[in-house]
Image: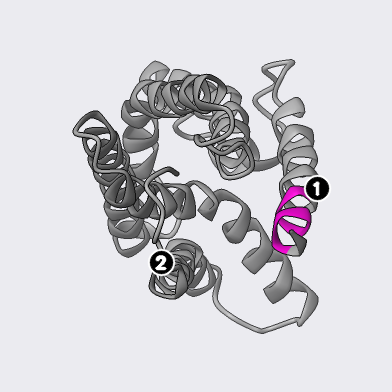
Amino acid sequence: MLKKILFTLFLLITSILLFNISYLYIGFDKHVDFLQTKQFIYKLKSWKYSFYIHVFTGILIYISGGLQFLISYQKYPKLHRILGYLYVGFIFITFPAVLIMSFRANGGYIAQVSFVTQTLLWLLFTYLGLRAILKNTLITHKKFMIRSYALTLSAFTLRFLAFLIGMMKIDLHPNVKYIFIAYGSWIINLVIAEIIIKKSPFTFDNT
């Protein structure tokens, strides 16, 4: 029960933070926040459209995915299923946009490899989670959805690592810092996901 309360608070706080970030871009001002570092490619329609798709669907993916871990299939099967299809559907819609952005990520080729790898794993784990539930292999479904959501959470981890480095005043070259953040944001999350999977009993038939 305590874990559920803590996760609820975490989901609520981080959702508000991500909403505030997304809200910055509602006016489509190209000189806002992160876009200030992307002036040279903002003119590319493919990147610009991808960015806004990523920003405005990201919060929906984050919330629909998180709620699935609070609203159990066993107690609320219809609601859990609806949230699941929303989560998967939004990821399938957003995936091409995120992939396009990954190839243009800050930090050079090394950081771009990280983001492309993360994006491909995100799609793979989500697909495997969907396939598992369609085959009624519920434990496998839950394991892959934990991995998928861990990668969804990397959006939060990336910002947290950037904040932490700034707060600790660690002197790193901007590219080195961004490469560390790019890899750390999803590798750390996957390691935590695997620990959770390993420690979970998975002795039940429903997610």
Instruction: Identify the amino acid type marked 2.
Output: Ile
| Mark 1 neighbour class, 10 Å CA radius: few under 14, some 14 to 19, many 20 or more | few
Instruction: Please tell me which residue lies in front, 114 or 188.
Output: 188
Instruction: Identify the amino acid type marked 1.
Output: Ile
The residue located at (80%, 51%) in the rendering is 9
In this rendering, the answer to whether 162 lies above or below 25 is: below
In this rendering, the answer to whether 184 lies above or below 149 is: below
The boundaries of the magenta stretch are 3-8
Residue 55, image x and y in percent? 58, 29
Residue 169, image x and y in percent? 75, 81
Dot 2 or dot 1, earlier in sequence: 1
2 or 1: mark nearer the eye: 2
| Mark 2 neighbour class, 10 Å CA radius: few under 14, some 14 to 19, many 20 or more | some
Which quadrant holds the C terminus? top left
Q: Quadrant of residue 186?
A: bottom left
Residue 23, image x and y in percent? 76, 26
Q: Secondary structure at mark 1?
A: helix
Q: Disc 1 designates what residue? A: 13
- In the picture, the disc for residue 197 is 2
Instruction: Please tell me which residue lies in front, 130 or 20.
Output: 130
- In the picture, the disc for residue 70 is none
The residue located at (36%, 58%) in the rendering is 108
Judged by its main secondary structure, the magenta piece is helix
Q: What is the CA distance from the residue labelled 2 to the residue labelled 1?
A: 24 Å
Residue 98, image x and y in percent? 39, 35
Residue 188 is left or right of residue 142, and the answer is right
Residue 58 is left or right of residue 190, and the answer is right
Instruction: Please tell me which residue lies in front, 153 or 143.
Output: 143
Q: Quadrant of residue 30?
A: top right
